[in-house]
Amino acid sequence: MIEIKNLEKTYPSKSGDVVALKDINLTVEDGDIYGIIGLSGAGKSTLVRCINLLEKPTSGQILIDGEDLTKVTKNRLLEIRKKVSMIFQHFNLLQQRSVLKNVELAGEIAGDKNPTERAKELLKLVGLEDRLNYYPSQLSGGQQQRVAIARALMSDPKILLCDEATSALDPETTHSILELLKTLNKKLGLTIVIISHQMSVIESICNKVAIIDKSQIVSCGYLKDVFLSPTNEVAKKLIYSGHVNTGIKGEKFVKLMFTGEVDKPIVANVISELKISVSIMYAETKVINDTVCGQVIFRLPSYNEDIKKLTDYLTRENVPFEEVDSDALY
Ligand code: ADP
Ligand code: MG
């Protein structure tokens, strides 16, 4: 559905060009909830704005259903943009208009002469059927974002781009908005690209993720794979986020990965059957796309003696593992 090929974006400035995106290649398929995560200034907003050509790429291609947006006519671009809606961190509602009027206006702009019924229907879908005549200032942040979502749906989009859409919301409201997005993905078959600097947001909703660091994608794929085997420094920072006791520099550890297939008390058995008194340096389980995934990082008291015993056992029990360096956890 969305193919980004060799995308580059440079902002000219007096003190030298700012490279915001470098050699970006990414494919989002129909029905994906694709997360793009990175630290502040990494280039996330620029990337998402390039997807609907709000920002013109310096070079490269943006293909939506095979059509290259950098090559189409202006009119065609406006047509395609209806299929690619967007929501933002600060909702961007019109303060002088009621909830219903805010949503209706989007319909009018998309060419709908009688937008009222559809606006009401969508406001019901986002749970605001009893707030039609309220003004934005009378609503909570979560409710305002729901209005923005209804508004974004007025043009009947196939893709919804969300730029830090929950970053101004408290954790509970964030959760409810993410649940709503999940429902829209299922019910309407909406493809969603969700930009965030928070791993927790990505984890709770996305099936795939790309990690962007200093203008480049450093890791991408199914969330489960990226989460269980972060290969790059920023990925590790975002995933382990300071929770790992990193031990002595250069020390070796063993990482066990669980993806829901093994149904035995592996850690307990390592201790009681193999008689290895491991120390746990890091342990976490998460539910990713309805599967419990986890990883445990062990320190072995006598690494060289115990490692073979342990890895033989893990192989026998079909538990994926990796030997990792403590440096790998920073
Ligand atoms: P993020 O959303 O990940 O925080 P942005 O995409 O906003 O990052 O910014 C990426 C880089 O591009 C930053 O260095 C930022 O300063 C720069 N940048 C973004 N927009 C502009 C602009 N309109 N003009 C000049 N530089 C910009
Ligand atoms: Mg941003």
Image (tube, rainbow, N blue to C red):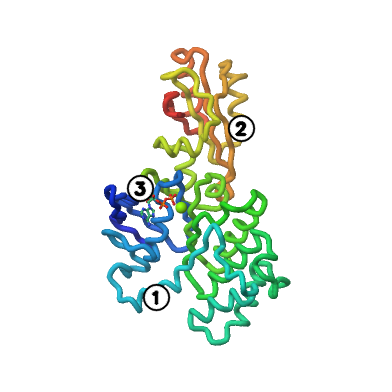
Residue 110, compared with residue 38, is above or below; it is below
| Residue 191 place in picture, x, y as percent | 48, 63
User: With 169 as the anchor, is 112 left or right in this view?
Assistant: left
Residue 217 in view in this figure: yes
Q: Is mark 3 on a helix, strand or loop?
A: loop
Callout 2 amino acid: Lys
| Residue 63 place in picture, x, y as percent | 33, 65
Residue 264: give its label: 2
Q: Is mark 1 on a helix, strand or loop?
A: helix
Q: Residue furthest right?
A: 130
Residue 78: give its label: 1
Front residue of 90/319: it is: 90
Looking at the image, tell me whether mark 1 or mark 3 is earlier in sequence order. 1
Contact check, label 2 and label 1, Cβ < 8 Å:
no
Callout 1 amino acid: Leu
Q: Quadrant of residue 185?
A: bottom right
Contact check, label 1 and label 3, Cβ < 8 Å:
no
Looking at the image, tell me whether mark 2 or mark 1 is earlier in sequence order. 1
User: With 161 as the anchor, is 8 left or right in this view?
Assistant: left
| Residue 30 place in picture, x, y as percent | 45, 63
- The residues tagged by marks 1 and 3 sit, at their Cα atoms, a distance apart of 27 Å
Residue 215: give its label: 3
Q: Which residue lies furthest to the front in this view?
A: 14
- The residues tagged by marks 2 and 1 sit, at their Cα atoms, a distance apart of 56 Å
Query: Is disc 2 surrounded by few (<14), some (14 to 19) or many (20+) residues within 10 Å?
Result: few
Q: Name the residue: 35% across, 77% down.
A: 76
Callout 3 amino acid: Ser
- The residues tagged by marks 3 and 2 sit, at their Cα atoms, a distance apart of 43 Å
Residue 107, compared with residue 206, is above or below; it is below
- Locate the N terminus and report the quarter of the image it occupies: bottom left
Q: Is mark 3 within 8 Å of ligand 1?
A: yes
